[in-house]
Image (cartoon, rainbow, N blue to C red):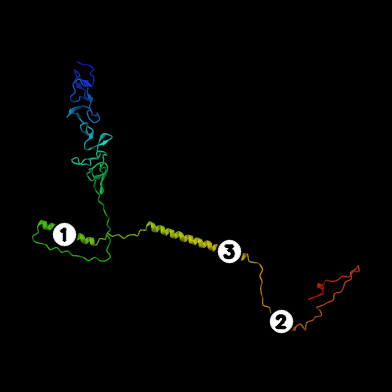
């Protein structure tokens, strides 16, 4: 019995390869064994010879191929590792199309009214919980307002004449026709139109504010101008000269003045001033201005 077999061999006579090794085709039993091209992450690690090539014995779930290097359907490659597609069970397992993209993992066939990268959202027009697989169509309720018509509506009388032989199908048809007629008549008295309240746009509001600001500025400028003019007027009035020349009517008649000259007393026009003798014997003369009296 051989002990301590070399070349990755085992057996009684070292004639076999170890579990994760293989011997090339055509090599004798004494030749060494080569490692299997199978990763323990993607497969069992062991291999066998098939068509002259080493083939992995068993691939792990999500892998396939001779060397278990490819991802199966419902798996995608993420850093050389096959990861299951996460589509929240909103896909058709029996579909012939791939469930998700083999490189990005983007779900390609969302069902049950879902959408999104992982089929995690309800499609447009549907509401609900996509994870619970209950996306339902969205029902929009439009409130209607019943208004009393201003004019008296014309009344319509519907007379149904009975027939002697009426089958169940005919009676049902007439009942549906009567209901549709009554519905159309009731709709004539229902007004769904509501009074439209005029809305002020943002542009109109800005224009109104601008007009008010301009008006206030104009009023302030007018007030300041009025105060300035008033102060200028007061300053000019206070700085006026305190004296004035007043012209009055003269009642003197030049003709009467010339007529009164001959009758005037000229005796008092000239008077001789007495010469005063100064005590010291000197003669004192009066000023020429004192020689005349007016």
* Residue 36 against residue 190 in the figure, above or below: above
Q: CA distance from mark 2 to mark 1?
A: 130 Å
Task: Identify which residue is drawn at 13% across, 58% down.
Answer: 173
Mark 2 nearby-residue class (10 Å; few <14, some 14–19, many ≥20): few
Question: Do residues under tags 2 and 3 come within 8 Å of each other at their CB atoms?
Answer: no
Badge 1 crowding class, 10 Å Cα cut-off, few under 14, some 14 to 19, many 20 or more, is few
Q: Would you say 273 lies left or right of 4 here?
A: right
Q: Where's residue 228, x and y in %?
A: 55, 62
Q: Nearer the viewer, mark 2 or mark 1?
A: 2
With respect to residue 59, does 202 lie above or below? below
Q: Earlier in the sequence, mark 1 or mark 3?
A: 1
Residue corresponding to mark 1: 177
Return the residue found at the far left: 165
Viewer-proximal residue among 200 and 191: 200
Of the pair 145 and 225, the residue shown nearer to us: 225
Give the labeled residue for mark 2.
254
Helix, strand or loop status at disc 3: helix
Label 2: which secondary element: helix
Q: Which residue is mark 3?
A: 232
- Name the image quarter holding residue 77: top left
Sooner in the amino-acid sequence: mark 2 or mark 3: 3
Q: What secondary structure is marked by label 1?
A: helix
Q: Quadrant of residue 54?
A: top left
Residue that lies at the very extreme toward the right in this rendered image: 281
- First of labels 2, 1 by sequence position: 1
Q: Quadrant of residue 269?
A: bottom right
Q: Give x and y (percent) for residue 201.
A: 37, 57
Q: Residues within 10 Å of mark 3 (few under 14, many from 20)?
A: few
Q: Nearer the viewer, residue 94 or 1?
A: 1
- Point 16% across, 59% down: residue: 177
Tag nearer the camera, 1 or 3: 3
Real-space Cα distance between discs 1 and 3? 93 Å
């Amino acid at each position: 019995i051989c002990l301590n077999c070399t070349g990755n061999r085992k057996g009684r006579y070292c004639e076999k390869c170890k579990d994760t090794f293989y011997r090339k085709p055509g090599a004798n039993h004494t030749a060494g064994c080569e490692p299997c091209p199978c990763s323990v992450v993607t497969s069992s690690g062991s291999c066998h010879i098939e068509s002259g090539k080493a083939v992995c014995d068993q691939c792990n779930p999500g892998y396939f191929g001779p060397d278990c290097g490819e991802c199966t359907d419902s798996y995608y490659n993420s850093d050389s590792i096959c990861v299951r597609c996460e589509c929240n069970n909103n896909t058709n397992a029996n579909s012939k199309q791939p469930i998700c993209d083999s490189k990005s993992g983007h779900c390609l066939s969302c069902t049950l009214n879902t959408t999104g990268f992982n089929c995690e959202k309800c499609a447009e027009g549907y509401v609900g919980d996509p994870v619970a697989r209950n996306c339902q169509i969205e029902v929009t309720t439009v409130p209607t307002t019943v208004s009393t018509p201003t004019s008296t509506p014309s009344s319509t009388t519907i007379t149904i004449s009975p027939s002697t032989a009426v089958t169940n199908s005919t009676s049902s048809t007439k009942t549906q026709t009567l209901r549709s007629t009554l519905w159309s008549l009731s709709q004539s008295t229902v007004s769904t139109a509501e009074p439209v309240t005029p809305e002020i746009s943002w542009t109109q509001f800005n224009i109104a504010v601008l007009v008010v600001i301009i008006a206030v500025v104009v009023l302030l400028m007018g007030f300041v101008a009025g105060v300035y003019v008033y102060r200028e007027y007061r300053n000019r009035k206070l700085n006026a000269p305190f004296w004035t020349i007043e012209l009055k009517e003269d009642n003197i008649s030049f003709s009467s003045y010339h007529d009164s000259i001959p009758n005037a007393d000229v005796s008092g026009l000239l008077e001789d001033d007495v010469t005063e003798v100064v005590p010291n014997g000197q003669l004192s003369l009066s000023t020429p201005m004192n020689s005349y009296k007016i």
